[in-house]
Amino acid sequence: MSNTTPSQKSIAMASINRDAAVALIDASIAAAKAIGIDAAVAVIDATGNLRAFERTDGAPFLTVDVAIDKAWTASSFGFPTHVWNDYVTKDPKVAPLAYRPRMVAVGGGYPIIENGKLIGGVGISGGTYQQDQDACVAALEKLGFEVPA
């Protein structure tokens, strides 16, 4: 063990602010409506905590937890949720992650990236995985966030 003490004991962390989180909710609801689905939308901050949430009147109640967990999954490692499906089904060393509480490995969750930094996650639930995924991409692009593949 080293006898030296680091001079700094914390790190600076970028995280989505309230105004951007609410704007992303509004853009996501508009994108879902344009696609023709009722949906729940969640925005998680960089620490994995819920920052903003909305559920349209016609969205089933199960969409609430699924949207939140999609956002959480996407923000955990900075990968869109649809890529987790390949990870947990094709790699036996990663497959046990599929059994983690809150892990969602279907489309509809994206990390929120600004200037190359992960600042949160967004999750949409209400349609097919592709509809949820498309609504996420449309909302992120509308607000100028980076959209990973």
Image (cartoon, rainbow, N blue to C red):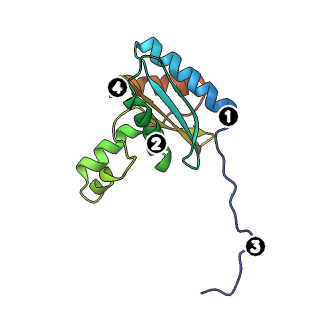
Give coordinates of residue 91: x percent, y percent: 26, 54
Q: Amino acid at mark 4?
A: Gln
Q: Quadrant of the C terminus?
A: top left
**Residue at horizontal 64 percent and vertical 39 percent from the top:** 16
Depth check, mark 3 against mark 2: the one in front is 2
Q: CA distance from mark 2 to mark 4?
A: 16 Å
Q: Quadrant of the N terminus?
A: bottom right
81 w.r.t. 132: above or below: below
Q: Is the C-beta separation of discs 1 and 4 under 8 Å?
A: no
Give coordinates of residue 82: x percent, y percent: 36, 37
Q: Is the C-beta separation of discs 2 and 4 under 8 Å?
A: no
Q: Earlier in the sequence, mark 3 or mark 2?
A: 3
Q: Which residue is mark 2?
A: 74
Q: Which residue is mark 1?
A: 18
Q: Label 3: how many residues lie within 10 Å, few (<14), some (14-19) or many (20+)?
A: few
Give coordinates of residue 95: x percent, y percent: 27, 54
**Local secondary structure at mark 1:** helix
Q: Which residue is mark 4?
A: 130
Picture disc at residue 7: 3
Q: Amino acid at mark 3?
A: Ser
Q: Amino acid at mark 2?
A: Ala
Q: Earlier in the sequence, mark 2 or mark 1?
A: 1
Q: Amino acid at mark 1?
A: Arg
